[in-house]
């Protein structure tokens, strides 16, 4: 009997080890796909690879279909139809297109025009790769075309009309966050109770990870010098979205001055009081658009509006100083190398 | 052999089991630790098709629906040097040392590794 007892404990340990590898436990599954002219990564917590794959593929399809509606560069998109008919006639659009334009208008109103989806005619004057800075006259000439108040929506007819010729609606500052919301909604409908959707840097998390901890999102360092200081801070996220706008994505330096893609709609020139702005809120569509709005408003007015809107914000100002709303205190971990 | 097993104590056997478990775990741990994301992975039609070392000077031509796309690695960075797609979004991305360049018309994705490093840091995604 004693002889058998000696083998019993190792045998039990081995059983425990094998059972811990069982396939039916909840695990995280991750897939990526090129969509919306960027890279979308979806992670879900599921009981099996099959369940995860099906839910993720369905979410990718939803994002792709939405992307086809609002693709700025495709002649076939509803967005292009709206732009082609600027100053000519109203265009009938799908509920998703109408919804995102209405949300863009909400952010424009709330931010007093700091976020403006009609910024297209100014953006197209710049080429950040070839370091093309438009002349003052060119910038001034296109300014009258930038005004969100000239977007006319008729909800009953589901139509959109840009009231001036040559206006250009560009939903690039809001579409990725909206897509993250759509993907999360689809995953939940497929029975997934926890996951993370990252449409480039626009991220939405729901539920908890398999270890019952919140998802952790790293915030990019706007002045990264090496591979070791890519992240400036990290924040736990659950049932919230986060987006960041920074002056380091599309930019060039000329005569010691940084010119980037986050333009002030009222002047046509890049906003220069922030390096990056990260926003946390319930909806990705709001974090995406408000990160641009707060960037343009600058640290003081940005933080003020964020508090008013009940959003958490981390702003790195033009001198590299970090500002946060009180809600982020105790949640944000600043990396050691900052 | 039987004699040797008979002469072992329970503690010996436990130690033996522990050592086997540790060596099996070691295979997986070292596999993760060694991958530092210094490769450029090129996906075509969603499938990984090429892997280039990031820290080397290379030019790679990849064919797609819009002709050949020229990818260049140099000094720890990668870029799309030439492409024949309409909007040239991939070319306009310029050099990157981390992250992704996407050319939707050519169904091409260029990924600079690093996800393993992020996982080691306990980060699930990066915003910015």
Image: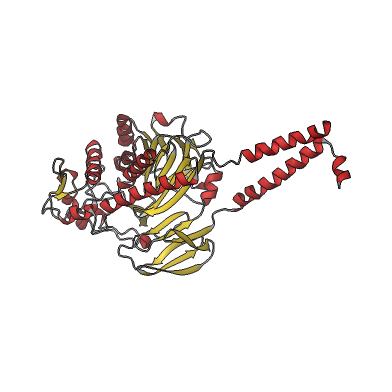
* Position of the N terminus of chain A by quadrant: top right
Q: Position of residue A177 (x, y in %)?
A: 34, 43
Q: Nearer the viewer, residue A184 or A263?
A: A184
Q: Is residue A124 visible?
A: yes
Q: Left or right: B28 with respect to A27? A: right
Q: Position of residue B14 (x, y in %)?
A: 77, 37
Where is residue A165, by image quadrant?
bottom left
Q: Position of residue A269 (x, y in %)?
A: 27, 50
Residue at 31% x, 39% y: name it: A286
Q: Residue furthest front?
A: A1
Q: Nearer the viewer, residue A47 or A67?
A: A47
B73 in relation to A290, above or below: below
B73 in relation to B30, above or below: below
- The colour scheme is secondary structure
Q: Is residue A278 visible?
A: no
B31 in relation to A102, above or below: below
Residue at 81% x, 39% y: name it: B12
Residue at 66% x, 36% y: name it: A16
A120 in relation to A10, above or below: below
Q: Nearer the viewer, residue A6 or A57?
A: A6
Q: Nearer the viewer, residue A293 or A96?
A: A96
Q: Left or right: A124 with respect to B18? A: left
Where is residue A124, by image quadrant?
bottom left
Q: Position of residue A47 (x, y in %)?
A: 50, 40
């Amino acid at each position: 009997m004693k002889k058998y007892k000696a083998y019993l404990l190792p045998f039990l340990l081995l059983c425990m080890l094998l059972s811990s590898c069982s396939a039916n436990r909840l695990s995280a599954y991750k897939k990526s796909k090129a969509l919306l002219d960027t890279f979308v990564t979806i992670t879900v917590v599921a009981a099996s690879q099959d369940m995860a794959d099906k839910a993720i593929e369905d979410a990718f399809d939803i994002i792709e279909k939405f992307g086809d509606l609002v693709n700025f560069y495709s002649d076939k998109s509803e967005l292009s139809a709206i732009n082609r008919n600027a100053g000519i006639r109203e265009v009938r659009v799908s509920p998703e297109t109408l919804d995102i334009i209405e949300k863009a208008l909400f952010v424009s109103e709330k931010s007093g025009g700091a976020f403006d989806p009609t910024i297209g005619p100014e953006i197209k004057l710049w080429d950040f790769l070839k370091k093309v800075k438009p002349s003052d006259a060119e910038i001034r000439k296109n300014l009258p075309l930038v005004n969100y108040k000239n977007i006319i929506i008729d909800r009953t007819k589901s139509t959109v009309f840009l009231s001036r010729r040559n206006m250009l609606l560009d939903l690039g500052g809001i579409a990725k966050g909206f897509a993250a919301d759509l993907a999360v909604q689809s995953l939940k409908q497929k029975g997934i109770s926890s996951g993370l959707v990252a449409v480039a840097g626009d991220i939405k998390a729901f539920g908890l990870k398999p270890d019952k901890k919140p998802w952790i999102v790293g915030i990019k360092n706007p002045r990264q010098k090496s591979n070791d200081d890519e992240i400036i801070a990290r924040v736990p996220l659950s049932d919230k979205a986060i987006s960041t706008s920074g002056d380091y994505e599309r930019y060039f330096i000329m005569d010691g001055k940084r010119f980037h893609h986050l333009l002030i709609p009222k002047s046509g020139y890049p906003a220069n009081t922030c390096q990056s702005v990260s926003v946390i809120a319930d909806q990705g569509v709001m974090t995406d658009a408000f990160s641009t709005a707060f960037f343009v408003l600058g640290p003081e007015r940005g933080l003020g509006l964020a508090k008013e809107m009940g959003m958490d914000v981390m702003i790195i100002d033009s001198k590299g100083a970090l500002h946060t709303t009180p809600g982020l205190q105790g949640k944000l971990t600043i990396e050691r190398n900052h | 052999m039987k004699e040797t097993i008979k002469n072992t104590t329970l503690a010996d056997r436990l130690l033996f089991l522990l050592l086997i478990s540790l060596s099996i775990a070691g295979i997986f741990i070292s596999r993760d630790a060694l991958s530092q994301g210094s490769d450029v992975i090129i996906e075509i039609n969603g499938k990984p098709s090429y892997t280039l070392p990031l820290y080397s000077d290379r030019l790679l031509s990849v064919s797609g629906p819009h002709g050949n796309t020229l990818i260049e690695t140099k000094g720890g960075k990668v870029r799309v040097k030439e492409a024949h797609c309409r909007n040239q979004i991939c070319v306009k991305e310029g050099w990157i040392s981390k992250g992704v360049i996407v050319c939707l018309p050519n169904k091409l994705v260029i990924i600079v590794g690093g996800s393993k490093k992020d996982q080691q840091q306990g980060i699930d995604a990066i915003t910015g």
